[in-house]
Image: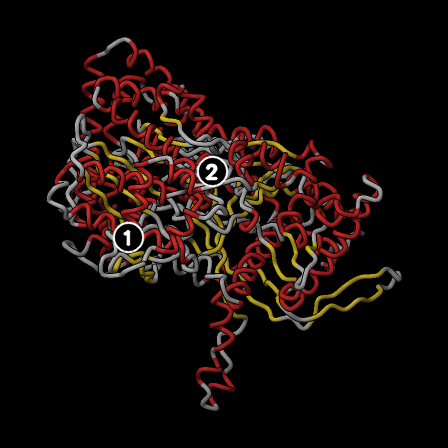
Amino acid sequence: MAEQNTSDACVLPNMPALPTEPEDLSQDIRRYLEYHLGRFLGCAPSYMYESLAYTIRDRIMSDWRNTWCKHQRDGVRRAHYLSLEFLIGRSLGNHLLNLELCGPVDQAVKDFAVTLEEIQDAEPDAGLGNGGLGRLAACFLDSCATLGLPVTGYGLRYEYGMFHQHIDNGYQVEDPDHWMRDGHPWEVERPEYTQTVRFGGRTEHFFDERRKPHTRWVDTCDILAVPYDVPVSGYRNHVVNTLRLWSASATDAFNLVEFNAGDYAESVANKNQAENITMVLYPNDANENGKELRLRQQYFLTSASLQDVFRQWRSQPLSSFADCNVFQLNDTHPSIAVAEMMRILLDDPDKRLQWNQAWEITSRCMAYTNHTLLPEALERWPVRLFEQLLPRLLEIIYEINARFLADVRQRWPGDNERVRRMSLIEEGPEPQIRMAWLAIVGSFSVNGVAALHSDLLAKGLFKDFYEMWPEKFNNKTNGVTPRRWLAMANPALAELLTEKLGDGWQADLGRLSAMRPWAENGDKDFLRRWQEIRLYNKQRLAKVVKKATGVTFEPGALFDIQVKRIHEYKRQLLNVLHVIHLYNRIKRGDTSNWVNRCVLIGGKAAPGYQRAKDIIKLVNNVAGVINNDPAVGNRLKMVFLPNYGVTKMMTICPAADLSEQISTAGKEASGTGNMKFMMNGSITIGTYDGANIEILDAVGEENFFLFGLDAEAVRNLRGNYDPQHYIATDNDLANVIGLLESDHFSGVEPCLFRGIIDGMKSPHDPWMTLADFRSYIDAQQRAELAWQDQEQWTRMSIRNCAASGSFSSDRTIGEYNSDIWHLSPLP
């Protein structure tokens, strides 16, 4: 695929596709192996993976180039998806599925005495994301390509992922995740489209020959943004969209004068400082250097991406730019795009529009997705830092704010408190720029990612803005791609679904609803095969657990799973309290009608989030006591699975019986893990929060274990929350807290968990963990009772899978397109 600089890009003839017969594939694999890599038969699987990746990439090229040519046609409206994260995982299996090459490739690799599974296992997870935000972006790009929509993803090409997690004495230890150590065969470097991104310097104001005022940003420190393109294939439709990733590079490799003078370290200092921008995903921003680097990353992404889109616009009139381009800002991270677009339109010598013209274009192009209800998670940057790094952008933000507040004052005369709340600049000892506010003011669409989340944004976090612009606000409930999370992750179930429903459900997930009658009408053969598939998937997960932790999971037990980012609002603590309660039951002999249970918790704690790290230590200590107590035996097992990521999730979600979605109500924006589990037949135990609510509505209360306070009850309880009341009135909770306080799980480290315990017992605990304990225990007992009737549990499992059609990212992207983007699918 080659991007064209000339207007004839849309009339170039189609590029022919390469043959896909097994013998042709085998021949090309051998050619890459021997002539490109210089390796021979019997080499390591990593070289086989690289050879196969290049072979498949060749088969993608024709569709990739033809798709790009269609994007470039005059009048085609395109969307540009800006995100600091794209957690794409492994690419090989995804392309094989979408291109219908699984069978031919499986035959082709037999010539090399290696299995396709062994080759796929050699591919590292792409370290381009952190958690749900990045995985959602990857699902969205998959759906955009499958729906044939002209959408380009823009992100950063991180050399290192967030980190590789291992556990040492129960503690999280962070190792570098150098996922690109051996290269990335799916990417294509595009140095001819390199952009220059500026930092620092100062501004100059001047008049042109017509006496019109203009501004120059001068004396800057420039960094090059080099693009690398990654193909995003659609499902069986010959559409291949592009994920463009920017890599930072110095304008000069090193200072030759300093090098010749013997100052070797200083000679490459600028190069190293430049490349730090894309060296690692999301630096720890607990210190000043981390904050500065993170702001550099955000501006680097948005500036390079916007410049790239304007480059492709060529000589077409700016008056029609907004008619053909829309930018979706994935969370608050790229919200500086509002000010950067204004800078380009105002300051670029070949544009230099008047303010009102530039604002008209900008505010018609930008659309903002909010992913959090936590005020502390919204980006705020010190004005001082902006003044140092982005002085021209700061001037523009000040001007946007002045004009915006004039409108606010006109709408609400004399309401100075409202003006203070809505100002883009938060006053205080150190003034801060509210980036979410900038995104709202500069966008024509603002959406949440679940019905409750969007409602809480309008009524709470963004209430002032909703009252000013109710027409801007809308909801787009998240979804996940069924290609990866069902067809790839659960091939045995996918085979059964294809047999019963026919092919094509992978791109039309609503067809799964046809399974519901088979659950209701007692199709014994279907129920038996469903149970066999689930047992097989649990056996696969048990092998992974054994290898990673040394703990044996019995596949016949209830697999109780919570995997997600470690955070207090996600309440892994509540899960641990329940496990300790079960341990107490065993120790006191209360095991009548017992259900054997295997509890798996996984996820990473942010490097600067100490309480989350303490929770990981608690999980491991509790697991160590339980797993080594002979009195417990196989009744209860617990593990913390290290280094949770996309590939591990593809083994975990088909094996989960019980999906833990237990966040404090009103704190989880949506969640997507809940959808992946449901899609594979897991049954949710969860609060009335995020997309749990819509899952509950889809499957019915009889197929969902609901517990806990809802968001309104949490709000009403705030200020009157008394954890001691719950401890005093609930013997089970008192026993759990007492066991923790006795240092039973930290015998050689007394008082180790005092901070966690004090946090839970504090009336100021925002997560209200103890308030939901009794309701959670009762819901777990309902789950145990349901598990004892395996036929009924299987019916519940089928109903969950059958109701998952509306949680496909294809549905979500269809709504983005119909309500926000208004793109025409490619022919």
Residue 58 falls left or right of residue 31: right
Q: Quadrant of residue 361?
A: top right
Q: Residue at x 50, y 83 (%)?
A: 256
Q: Residue at x 35, y 30 (%)?
A: 685
Q: Residue at x 47, y 40 (%)?
A: 141
Mark 2 touching mark 1, by CB under 8 A? no
In this rendering, does residue 65 appear at all?
no
Mark 2, other Cα within 10 Å: few <14 / some 14–19 / many ≥20: many
Q: Which residue is mark 2?
A: 140
> Can you tell which mark lies on residue 50?
1
The three-letter amino acid code for the residue at tag 2 is Phe
Residue 434 falls left or right of residue 677: right
* Helix, strand or loop under label 2: helix
In this view, the mark in front (2 or 1): 2
How many labels were placed on the picture?
2
Relative height, residue 521 to residue 761 (above, below): above
Q: CA distance from mark 2 to mark 1?
A: 26 Å
> Which mark is first along the chain, 1 or 2?
1
The three-letter amino acid code for the residue at tag 1 is Glu
Could you say where residue 219 lies in the image, as x and y percent from the top left?
A: 67, 73
In this rendering, does residue 106 appear at all?
yes
Q: Quadrant of residue 736?
A: top left
Q: Spot the residue most to the right.
A: 211
Could you say where residue 112 lies in the image, as x and y percent from the top left?
A: 16, 47
